[in-house]
Amino acid sequence: MALLLLLVLVAVVLGIIGVVAEGLGYLLIIGIVILVAALALIAVRWSQRTGRRPIR
């Protein structure tokens, strides 16, 4: 879980730097890619967790 939070934090920081600094738009793109990857990882882990419930 800490890795996911770190990925989201890095994505936000890179996005802010990419928007504020001129000529560093590629950092914004990298931040967006990292954010999408983190959200996909969260979705995968969440779907795996719900599938492990025992049948009663």
Image: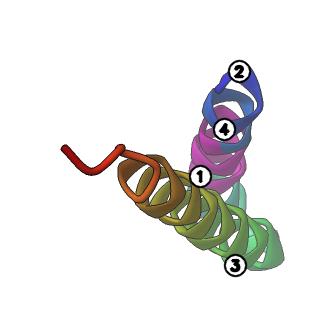
Left or right of 3: which side holds 28?
A: left
Q: Mark 4 or mark 3, which is nearer to you?
A: 4
Q: Earlier in the sequence, mark 2 or mark 1?
A: 2
Q: Mark 3 points at which residue?
A: 29
Say above or below: 36 vs 8: below
Residue designated by label 2: 2
Of mark 1 and mark 3, the one earlier in the sequence is 1
Q: In which quarter of the image is the N terminus?
A: top right
Q: Which residue is drawn at 78% across and 71% down?
A: 30
Q: What residue type is labelled 4?
A: Leu
Q: Give the range drawn in magenta.
A: 8-17
Foreground label between 2 and 3:
2
Residue 9 belongs to magenta span:
yes
Reply yes or no: does residue 23 show up in magenta.
Answer: no
Q: Nearer the viewer, residue 48 or 37?
A: 48
Give me the C-alpha separation between circle 1 and circle 3: 13 Å
Q: Is residue 19 left or right of residue 34?
A: left
Type of residue at label 3? Ile
Residue at the spot of label 4: 4
Q: Which of 17 and 9 is in front in this view?
A: 9
